[in-house]
Image (spheres, grey):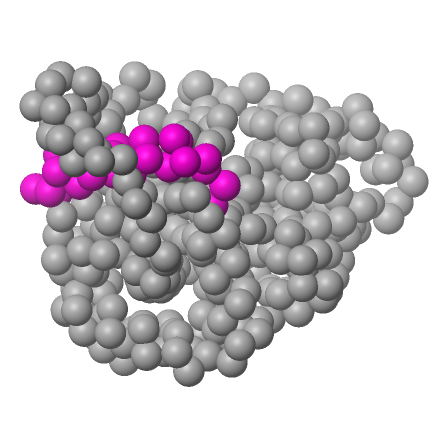
Amino acid sequence: MMRKGANAELAEDLVQDAMIAVWNKAGMFSPGKGSVTTWIYTIARNLRIDRLRREGSRYFTDIDEYEEASDDPASDDVVIGKQQDLAVTEALDVLPDDQRAVIVMAFMDDMTQSEIAEKLDVPLGTVKSRMRLAYRKMGSVLEDLR
Amino acid sequence: MKTAFHLDDATVVAYAGGSLSNCLSVVAASHVAMCDHCRAKVRRAEAVGAVLLETCEVQQMKPDALSSVFERIDGSDWVQPKTRSDASDDPDPSLPLPVSRLLDCRLDDVRWKTAGPGVGIHVIEKNDDGSSLYMLKVRPGHKLPDHGHAGQEMTLILRGAYRDVIGRFAPGDVADLDEHIEHQPVIEDGEDCICLIATEAPARFKGLVPRLLQPIVGI
């Protein structure tokens, strides 16, 4: 939370909110959809966007509701959480440094693609292509688990 | 729903990481709601975010943080998030929820402002940084002005279809384009084409007339 620009007090508040949300929503967790870590990540991300942006993060929760109603069996139902986390960790470890850097900045530092391009002093297109390459490598590892 | 055109992988990463702008996020979310393929992709990207979260440096919380959490759980200050059933509005069931939530009426009842012959526009959001979110309704057979983009432009087809240099876009398809693409969508015969569009910056029209109309129309 603090890496993403929240001050210490707000970060503390958000972490508490996330813990309470996890407690209250525990019954809604569905192991078939991914690991507990992923579930907690999405809760924390949505709370942070709600707090830091005027518009809030309704679009994420909207999708969750949609997915509850979906009878599509093709999502990552059979991926077992731990195995998934392990596979992603391994895939991240072997990413080239430049690709790993843009992924870390996008997920952990809340930086837009333009901000990343500016910070690294590379064209926007380069940031996008590094993101695509990194995602494809990690995505294919996860897809193989299905 | 099976769709032919999907989100760029770089957009999937930005969306799952929470760093995509609001306007673009609404279109991304609406496509994801209509597309099983992209929904699975977003889930995979979120799994990456989760693993990265675990690699973060651990920060010390206040000593009373945990007891304060339990007190709040026991107390009554937790408000359950609204669910679809108790949302105050009456969303149009023919639209993905992230779009219908932003309209105060059904798609058939939207009041369109004329944006040129055969083209209606409904602006949902327009920001000081130049980004905007709007819907276009274009008559069958109509050709939109040739244009490029100063930043990312994302178009989701809600009804009807169009063709351009990239291919044929039908309901659920998304055109996730960057500043290097120039296109001139031509609406298919049969029915109006209604799309939801988010842009990071105003479109760059090639013709003089669309350029002159642009400030009036608002995109």
Query: Quick check: is A123 in the magenta stretch?
Result: no
- Is B106 placed left or right of A142 in the picture? right
Furthest toward the front, the residue is: B63
The quarter of the image holding the C terminus of chain A is bottom left
Q: Residue at x 7, y 42 (%)?
A: A27
**In this picture, residue B213 sits left or right of residue A129:** right
Figure quadrant of the N terminus of chain A: top left
Question: x, y percentage for residue B199?
Answer: 64, 43
**Image: B115 above or below B96:** above
Q: With respect to residue B5, does B139 lie above or below? A: above
Is residue B184 at least partly visible in the picture?
A: no
Residue B51 vs residue A136, the one in the foreground: B51
Residue drawn at (70%, 56%) of the image: A118
Q: Position of residue B139 (x, y in %)?
A: 64, 38
Q: Is residue B218 visible?
A: yes
Q: Nearer the viewer, residue B71 or B144?
A: B71
Q: What residue is drawn where x is 27% and y is 22%?
A: B87
Residue appearing at x 12%, y 38% in the figure: A23
